[in-house]
Structures are given as C-alpha cells and as structure tokens.
Image (spheres, coloured by chain):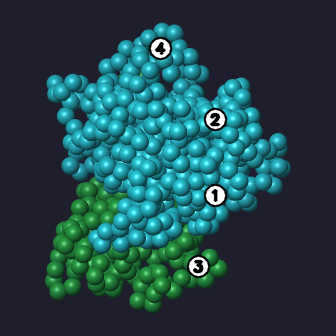
Amino acid sequence: MEPITEIRSRTAVLPLDDVDTDQIIPARFLRTTVREGLGENLFADWRYNSDGEKNASFVLNRPEAQGAQILVAGRNFGCGSSREHAPWALLDFGFRAVISTEIADIFRNNSLKNGFLPVVVDAGIHGWLLENPGVELTLDVESRAASLPAGRVTEYPLESFSRYCILNGVDQLGFLLNHAGDISRFESRAGV
Amino acid sequence: MSAKSLFEKVWDRHIVVPESAETPAILYIDLHLVHEVTSPQAFSLLRDAGLKVRRPDLTLSTMDHSTPTISVGSLQELKVVSEPAAFQQIQQMERNCEDFGLELRGMDSDERGIVHVIGPELGATQPGKTIVCGDSHTSTHGALGALAFGIGTTEVAHVLATQCLLQRKPRTFAVNLQGRLPAGVTAKDIILAIIGKIGVDGGTGHAIEYRGSAVVSLSIEERMTICNMAIEGGARTGMFAPDDATYEYLAGRPLAPQGAAWDEALSRWQTLPSDDDAQFDKEVSIDVSALKPMVTFGTNPGMVIPVDDVIPSPTLSDPGFAKALDYMALEPGRPLAGTPVDVVFIGSCTNSRMSDLRAAARVMAGRQVADGVQMLVVPGSARVKREAEAEGLPEVFEAAGAQWREPGCSMCLAMNGDYVPAGKLAVSTSNRNFEGRQGKGARTVLASPLTAAASAVSGTISDPRPLIG
C-alpha cells in the first residue's frame, strides 16, 4: 500500500442513501481471481444501458464528474455484502475517498485496508456537499481534516491505527505477523 | 466483576493482545470458513509473501457461490454447465486448497454446501467460538452462541496467515423478542420485522443479541434464519445464547466434541449466556405474537410490510424511495398481495434447511405451481438434499411443477448461471432485494418459505395462512 498524506480533488455526487455493494460491483463480476480491472464495471447496472452503451444521465458519466477522486454519497454507503471487490472497483475507477454521513461497517474496514478513505461528516456539511457537486476538497490524513472552500474545515473520525497505516503505507498483515509469539502463547493457553 | 453479555464473554476469551488507544485488539479466530469467491486474492497474497496457512485444522473450505445447481457427473460436464469464469474460480479453489494443505469439501464431497449451512450441520459451529468468513452472512453461526461475522478478502489473508484479526470492539444491541409466533408466521418474518423497525443501518457498529421470552420456542434452524440477516440491519453480528436446544442440536454431529470432551465443552458453554444484569448499549423490543407474514416491496430489506398491507407512499425527504418503487414497478397505496409473480426461489443461507423445505412442501403438497411461474428449490447442502430425498420432499416439489436442484447459493446472488430475467418479479426466500441482486433488472420480493410457496401456487404474492389450515 502506498503512503497517503492527503487527497485533493473535485467531488462527484451520488445523492442516494443505502448504496449497497451489489450496486458498487454486481455479483456477476466477482467471478475473478484477481483484484485488478474491476473499475470498468463499477456501478455497472447504473452506468451502462441494457445495450451496453453508457447511460448519459448517470452522474459518473457526466463530463463534470470526470477525474473526480472524491465521491460524495448518501447515508449508509457500502451496505450489504463483505466483497472487498467494492473498494477495489472504486479505486480502480479512480476514486480515492467517499464522503457520507454514515458508512457500513464491513465496507469501511475493507476500504481502510486498501487506502480508500471513508470520511464521515455531519448532516450540515454533507447537505452542502450534496448541493454543490464538483467543489474542490482536501482530505488530510494526519490531522483528519476535511477542508472545504472558503476556509471551512471539519474533522472526520479516523481510528488512530488505521490513520497510522494509511499515512505510512503499513501492511496490517506485517503487524499481525510480528505478534506470532503472542499468538502461539494464546494457542497453548487456550488449548486450541 | 461487572456483569457481562454473551458477546462480551466470547470476545474477552479470544483476546490475544488487548486493544489500546493506538491499536485495535488482536482477536483469535477459532474457525475460518473459506469459499471460492472471496479467497483467491487472499491465497495470492500468501503465495507472494511466501506464507503458509497457520491452522489448516481450523479452516473449513467449500464451494458454493459460483457452483452450478444442475447435476454434473464429471469435471468435463462441470466445465460445460459453468460459466468460463466461474469454472476457473472453482479450479483455482481446488488448486489453492491443494497448495496450502486445506481439506476441501468440493464438488464431489457429500459434505459440500452453502458454507453457512454446512458449518452448523457438521458441528463445526459451536457456542463460544469466534467464526469468520469472507461473507457477510457469517452472522448465521451466531444462532448457536458463536461470535461470527463477515470479513473482506484482505482479512481472509490475515486469518489464513495468523489465525487472528485486528478488531475494535463493537457496541452491544439487545433485540428483545416477546410472545409466541402465530401459525403461518415464521423466523423469516421476525427478522424482516426487526429490520423494518430498526432500518438497514440500525445495527451499524453493534453486535446484536436476540433475547426474550420468544427465544426458547425458536428452533436452532429458526435462530439461524434470524441471525443470518443481522447484517441486513447493519449489525456486525447476531447471536442467541446457547440453551438445551443448542446442545441437543449439536450432540453427535461429526465435528462436535464427543465423550469426555463433550462434557467439558458443555460446562464451558453453560457459562456463556449473558449475566442477568448485563448492560446493552442499545435495546429494542418486538412482540412476535402480533406479527404477520412479511414481504418486501422495495430495494432494501428495510422496505418491508405485512403481506396484507398496502405499499407506503414515498416521502420527499428520501429520493431513493421513489426510485425503489419505480425499479420494482409498484404503485404506492395499492396492496402488494395479488401482484403477479414470475419466479419463486426457495433456497440460500437464510432459508434452505430441512425446516424451510418442509414448510414449503407443506404448502405445495397436492397443489400446482401456477401457469407461467418458474419455481426453483435449492437445498442448502448435500446433506440437506439427502435428508429431503429420504423424506420424499423432491417428489412433492416436482409433482407441483417446481425444479429440485443441487445445493449452492444459486439464485440468491445469481453468480452461477441461475438468475431472474430482467424485469421479472421473484418471490425469494433469500436475504437481499437489492437492485439486480438476483440478475440484472430482476425485481425481488423477500419472504418466508411459506409465503414463497403460497405465491408459487397462486401465481401472485400471497398470504400463506389460508393455505396451511
């Protein structure tokens, strides 16, 4: 994982609540044994018409959304299945962060493991972001600060260990492997 | 010592390194369930790093998501009936299990099936265990008093390599179930009613314990249905305290403890139920005696009503509501019952066990699937299939005009070639009515096996209660 200190980008806005992982990447695209290439089918059933052509009215197909790295979505983003293909698809497409008032647990965990930043803000800030698509934001990892236009700054929650791993590009598996001694001691104590 | 809940007891007994302000807890995992869809990239990670699977003996592997439900006699036939990518995934799983020394309940195993069906039926799922799987419906195993939750593929690699996970402790949520279920109302209706009440994010950040006077009369299979859909309410997991029904269910199962080990395990399990004065961070109560059969009308499991109710009207504050009704081609203010049905699916980790198949067969016996309706019955495991065959259930379904298939996840998520065609309406005993979940453009109504079977017979969404007398 590459270290990330800040994400600076325009936003694209998908104002729906409860966007589930089946929408982010439909199950038929999970018949893969690698993690690359999923971006092509990100939001596949919304992005493409039944004839395979792009649905021009879908927000991510509009010219102003091109190149945006920060997705602003409705409440409870990423609910549903545990598929890590969801953050993989978002990253492969070019997104690096999602902002919502609430992000589903497993999706949040999976995102943090891949350096995809889940950002929760209050309803006031969120409402403003929904109404102002395309604004330029800076998400700072060290200070957990989201900087909006006109000097407006809000802090977002980011658990300290995840912040450390993202800032330093630390692989959490390495951290666990360093505790092999503790794990062996637990196994003999618990008799497993 | 302060009073503890069931969840807290299981959590505390698995702490390898406690959590601190800086780092999450290192939690030991007693049982890791592995399937072909969310594991390939995890095995690749181990391969690239030159790592082994730490505890193959605590790892239970099978194939369920992308496997065909049409009977196949050979690998060559499997290749013919499978989608090429699905076939490759199946082959990759076989190779990964071989390379890493894992026993695989594969295509030719008489113990294969949906991972959340075979764990309990083999007796691998036990009270007080920590159980994970790269699948959000892992919460199913909480029915036996295990702490069981879904994880992503990176975490699958963590558990394969270290048998541990880095976890922050979730908050606790007591869901109190009072009363006794009326006839024709099932465990599926209970969990749909709970999700309707708390919402699809009501449990976010929480571990649910289902408690209260209704629990004692719920069978283990019914508890599995209720735990299975904890994630649909946003919760990390759902659990029932183990009781005599749990011990009766487990006794004699192949991987359950035997003899002296059973006695020792039993005395440990009996200490697990929440202390009387245990505190929960959140609570909700439901009187199950007042419930009716429940059906969903929208595109998430929280959009649910009693089968005899009318479809609610959208509110201005929720643009998703109108979008959902539009997708479902349903009109607010009209009854949902009576809506024509194209497909009926009995199966999935929610409702594919013997009691589910018996319930559906009870409705189907002596009746016919309505003209124009396709009905698929997919047992949860090879064992369920054998037991159903011994009871003559396939004959009941086939005489009615339904198809009886091989075990697997099948039409629940439409990865294996079984799908609901675009625009068609399915009444399904599965767990998710998301847009496109059962096939691109498919419209899903979630319901109990009784309601699904009644709808198959009438050809419209139907209340099962008049049919079961």
Q: Is residue A152 visible?
A: yes
Res B262 label: 4
Coordinates of residue A52 in the picture (x, y in percent): 63, 79
> How far is the residue under mark 3 from the one under mark 2?
40 Å
Q: Quadrant of residue A31?
A: bottom right
Disc 3/disc 4 C-alpha distance (Å) = 58 Å
Q: Colour of chain B?
A: cyan
Mark 1 vs mark 3, foreground winner is: 1
The chain containing the residue under callout 2 comes to B
Q: Secondary structure at mark 4?
A: helix
Whole-percent x and y of residue A10?
A: 34, 84
Alpha-carbon distance for marks 2 and 4? 35 Å
Can you identify the residue that label 2 sits on? B361
Separation (CA) of disc 1 from disc 2: 19 Å
Amino acid on which disc 1 is placed: Asp
Given residues B371 and B22, the one toward you in this image is B371
Task: Evaluate if marks 3 and 2 touch, with contact meaning CB atoms under 8 Å apart.
Answer: no
The circle on residue B342 is 1
Asked if the residue at tag 4 contacts the one at tag 2, i.e. Cβ–Cβ closer than 8 Å, the answer is no
Q: Is residue A122 above or below residue B175?
A: below
Is B407 situated above or below A14?
Answer: above
